[in-house]
Image (tube, helix red, strand yellow):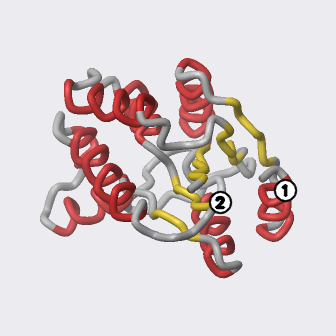
Amino acid sequence: MKRFVLTGAPGGGKTAIVRQLEVDGFSVVEEAATDVIALAQARGVVEPWMHSSFIDSVADLQRRRQIRASREPDEVQFHDRSVTCTAALAAYLGHAVSDALSRELERVMTEEIFQRRVFFIRNLGFVTPTEERRISFEETLRFERIHEETYRKFGFELVFIEPGSVSERVAAIKASL
């Protein structure tokens, strides 16, 4: 199975692209951080990303989703973010890279879970804050730079998907497969 990662700045349209790829018949794996945040907030934790356990919770959910999805028979699978994104998130938030995160990064790299080509979804020129995404556009640009640096550090080749309609961006991804 070829597993491709979609990454980029928050609010860049990754989820809409993933939904379209799913409608088009591709296997997709959901992004984890938003779900970890939503669950923690439902439990009364206002800013879960400030807790030291947040990064490990995201990495653990990503690992479980990736392993579960590996049983699917599809030839191509798209992942809305990966543990490399979680390492970028840790850097952005100023959290240390924990042993658990290091082990998961090592597992993913050693087992070559993902294709070396990563689809880097460029920002749309604005960001719409949500309960889970409390970030300004300026912070989004900084986060985008950290993501790019982190993926390059781990040796990934970035395929930049520029702003456009969902169908245009999905077409660009399909053309790059």
Distance of label 2 from label 1 (alpha carbons): 14 Å
**Secondary structure type for disc 2:** loop
Name the residue rendered at 23%, 40% in the picture: 56
Q: Nearer the viewer, residue 64 or 9?
A: 64
Q: Position of residue 141 (x, y in %)?
A: 63, 34
The answer to whether the residue labelled 2 contacts the one labelled 1, judged by CB atoms less than 8 Å apart, is no
Which numbered tag is attached to residue 8? none
Mark closer to the observer (2, 1): 1
Which numbered tag is attached to residue 13? 2
Name the residue rendered at 69%, 45% in the picture: 119
| The residue positioned farthest toward the top in the image shown | 153
Q: Is residue 166 above or below residue 63?
A: below
Q: Position of residue 48 (x, y in %)?
A: 23, 48
Q: Is residue 131 left or right of residue 154?
A: left
Name the residue rendered at 82%, 70% in the picture: 167
Q: Is residue 97 left or right of residue 168?
A: left
Q: Is residue 27 above or below residue 53?
A: below
Q: Position of residue 55 (x, y in %)?
A: 27, 39
Res. 52 image quadrant:
top left
Which numbered tag is attached to residue 172? 1
Name the residue rendered at 27%, 21% in the picture: 96
Q: Amino acid at mark 2?
A: Gly
